[in-house]
């Protein structure tokens, strides 16, 4: 069955669901070290936390948790791919896969999958920066999920 998502106003959610989100935020911030500490602090049972933890997320977290696939045409010169990878890492992107064709006519096609949940800037900004890099002939998003 395909997962379905709904946008729901906070004030109509049950307390257990809201408290589950509070527990996740406490754990993510490092304010508590264990699930036991967090559920005790917000007044939620461990079983309720584990029941709802995978079903409640802040909307901005869902939007940012994604993988993009970027296709590049790079000049066949030493260091260009390394520079591109460094720029992605410098923007907070996490490179997951790299596929590169054999260079033909002085260019190589490279397809890179990047996990973008920790980007320090907007994806469009990173793409513009990559497109303006010497040796990068083309950079475009070909997939996003």
Image (tube, helix red, strand yellow):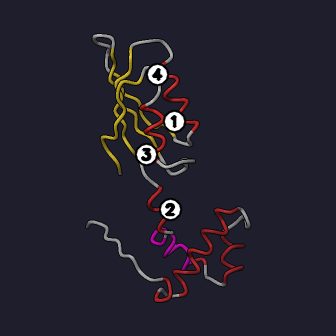
In primary-sequence order, the first of circles 1 and 2 is 2
Badge 2 density bin: few <14, some 14–19, many ≥20, Cα 10 Å: few
At label 4, counting other C-alpha atoms closer than 10 Å, the crowd grade (few under 14, some 14-19, many 20 or more) is few
Q: Magenta segment range?
A: 47-56
Q: Residue at x 49, y 64 (%)?
A: 60
Query: Which mark sits nearer the N-terminus, 4 or 1?
Result: 1
Name the secondary structure under disc 1. Answer: helix
- Say which quadrant the N terminus sits in: bottom left
Q: Residue at x 58, y 36 (%)?
A: 90
Task: Choose mark 4 or mark 2, whichever is in front.
Answer: 4
Q: Are marks 4 and 2 in contact (CB under 8 Å)?
A: no
**Image position of 25 with respect to 104: above or below:** below
Which label number is shown at residue 88? 1
**Nearest to N terminus: mark 3 or mark 2:** 2
User: Label 2 belongs to which residue?
Assistant: 61
Q: Is residue 87 above or below residue 7?
A: above
| Front: mark 1 or 2 | 1
Q: Position of residue 85 (x, y in %)?
A: 50, 29
Q: Earlier in the sequence, mark 4 or mark 2?
A: 2
């Amino acid at each position: 069955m395909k997962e379905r998502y709904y946008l729901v106003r906070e004030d109509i959610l049950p307390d257990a669901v809201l408290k589950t989100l509070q527990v996740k935020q406490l754990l993510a911030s490092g304010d508590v070290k264990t699930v036991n500490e967090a559920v005790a602090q917000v007044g939620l049972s461990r079983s309720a936390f584990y029941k709802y933890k995978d079903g409640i997320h802040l909307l901005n977290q869902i939007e940012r948790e994604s993988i993009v696939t970027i296709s590049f045409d790079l000049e066949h010169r030493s260091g260009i791919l390394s520079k591109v990878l460094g720029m992605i890492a410098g923007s907070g992107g996490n490179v997951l896969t790299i596929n590169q064709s054999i260079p033909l006519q002085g260019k190589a096609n490279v397809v890179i999958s990047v996990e973008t949940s920790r980007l320090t800037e907007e994806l469009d900004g990173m793409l513009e920066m990559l497109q303006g890099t010497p040796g990068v002939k083309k950079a475009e998003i070909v997939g996003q999920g």
